[in-house]
Amino acid sequence: MASPVRNGNALREPAPVRWLLIAATVSFLALFLLLPLLVVFVQALSNGVSTFAAALTGDETLASIRLTLITAAIAVPLNTVFGIAAAWAIAKFEFRGKNLLITLIDLPFSVSPVIAGMVFVLLFGKQGWFGGWLAEHDIKIIFALPGIVLATTFVTFPFVARELIPLMQAQGTQEEQAALTLGAGGWRTFWHVTMPNIRWGLLYGVLLCNARAMGEFGAVSVVSGHVRGLTNTMPLQVEMLYNDPGEYSAAFAVASLLALLGFVTLALKNFLEWRHGDELTALRGN
Amino acid sequence: MDITIRNLGKNYGDVVALRDIKLDITSGELLALLGPSGSGKTTLLRAIAGLETINQGSIRFGDIDATHLSVQERRVGFVFQHYALFMHMTVLDNVTFGLRMRKLSRRPPKSEIRRRGMELLELVQLKGLENRYPAQLSGGQRQRVALARALAIEPRVLLLDEPFGALDAKVRRELRTWLRQLHDDTGYTTIFVTHDESEAQELADRVVTMNEGVIEQAGHSP
């Protein structure tokens, strides 16, 4: 579709207005997004590359990187499966309580992550509902990996589902019905018809979910216990180093790595969008 | 294959969509279901396909009681109003989908699947377009891909929902003639839904008129 700004005059603003709008947007972005990120990298490298490298290869930092990656490696696949299931149910079936389910999916977005963390402490902590039973059976959830995974999964639940629901609703069920009449069972229909139609949306959802899973601070902070080298994820490690006067630039070194992970995610998303743009248009063509 | 429908009823809560439908379709017949929108004609078509559950009555395909068969087991060729082609598959992959989805024990070898697909594309005059995607086809071409895809499973009956509804007048006339020819050549029992009386009269062996969920006039077999 040709852009209306290039063709029609009706939507064309006078040049000064356009420039003013562009300038306002660019300076806002520069001031509030680019500058802070730049500061992170400048600070990280302020004491030289060797200090930067040393900060990143310290045992505690390496442990935090490992923990963050493990957490994301569990939370993201879980939310991918749950997200597809939820979006599938909402988009393709009519049932009672559907709106309630949609509201529930949004809950992690509307509730402060700190509260999400506290909920798990209330449930599984020493004084919590299941605390006694867990202690008896020697299962540690709070101040351990399971708690961190739970909190992260809770906070990042909506990303995949939110991305897929409007997409699947727009696509409707026509192609699935056609597959059924052609003899395909439910499972094969899902793999051969539904999945290919949602794969790009799914990928965006997964990437965003992953970015947030690795960056989550609030909820994880409550359940982690901040044990250095054990239950500190990267964001928690950044904060801990930052509060330590001697480790100021190390904090920024880890922070820059975290920011880089975010950049890679966005770059990957844009690359895929650019690379498969034709296919996306083809899928939306009908 | 003969199709026998008895006392078929369907309702959505208090709203009656189909009431006491009785219909006999002779093997090889080309039948039109004619009626205004909301008359239940599409619901009846979907009920025959098994895409719609029914509340009472029975549907038989020849000697087989199809009332409780699943959509897959009924093996009907269904052409959807907006074709419902698989947008991410080539034309050939669309046409051969039904064969490729068969259980391994009943699935023909790859080369055979391809051969049958190409044969069907030739039948619907789309030879040479097998590697295109549906988005690259015109409306009339998509319609014919949908038809070839439905024929690929060697259906017991061919069901078409407003087959010409989304096409412009010229293509519509061409396809009408062509579909009649195809029906006479292949001999599939065919039911199509339309709200266009002249289309129904011109194309079908027999016209069944529906209104408000009941059959008003069943016509006479030729």
Image (cartoon, coloured by chain):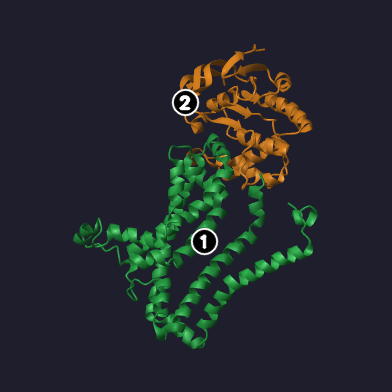
Element type at mark 2: loop
Closer to us: A103 or A275 = A103
Q: Which mark is residue B7?
A: none
> According to the image, label 2 marks what residue?
B13
Q: Are marks 1 and 2 on the same chain?
A: no
Kind of residue at disc 1: Leu
Along the viewing direction, whichever of A117 and A180 lies nearer the viewer? A117
Residue A29: where, in percent of width, then height?
61, 69
Q: Distance of mark 1 from mark 2, alpha carbons?
A: 43 Å
Q: Residue at x 66, y 29 (%)?
A: B162
Q: Which chain does the residue under circle 1 lie in?
A: A
Q: Residue at x 64, y 40 (%)?
A: B117
Q: Residue furthest left?
A: A136
Number of the front mark, 1 or 2? 2
Whether residue B63 is visible here, answered yes or no, is no
Q: Secondary structure at mark 1?
A: helix
Q: Nearer the viewer, residue A205 or B177?
A: A205
Which residue corresponds to mark 1? A207
Residue B176 in the image, given as x and y percentages of width and height: 73, 27
* As drawn, A272 above or below B13: below
**Looking at the image, which residue is at 24% across and 62% down?**
A126
Residue B132 visible, this orientation = yes
Judging from the image, what is the letter of the chain drawn in orange?
B
Residue at 44%, 79% (x, y): give it: A251
To which quarter of the image does residue B123 belong? top right
Drawing shade for chain A: green
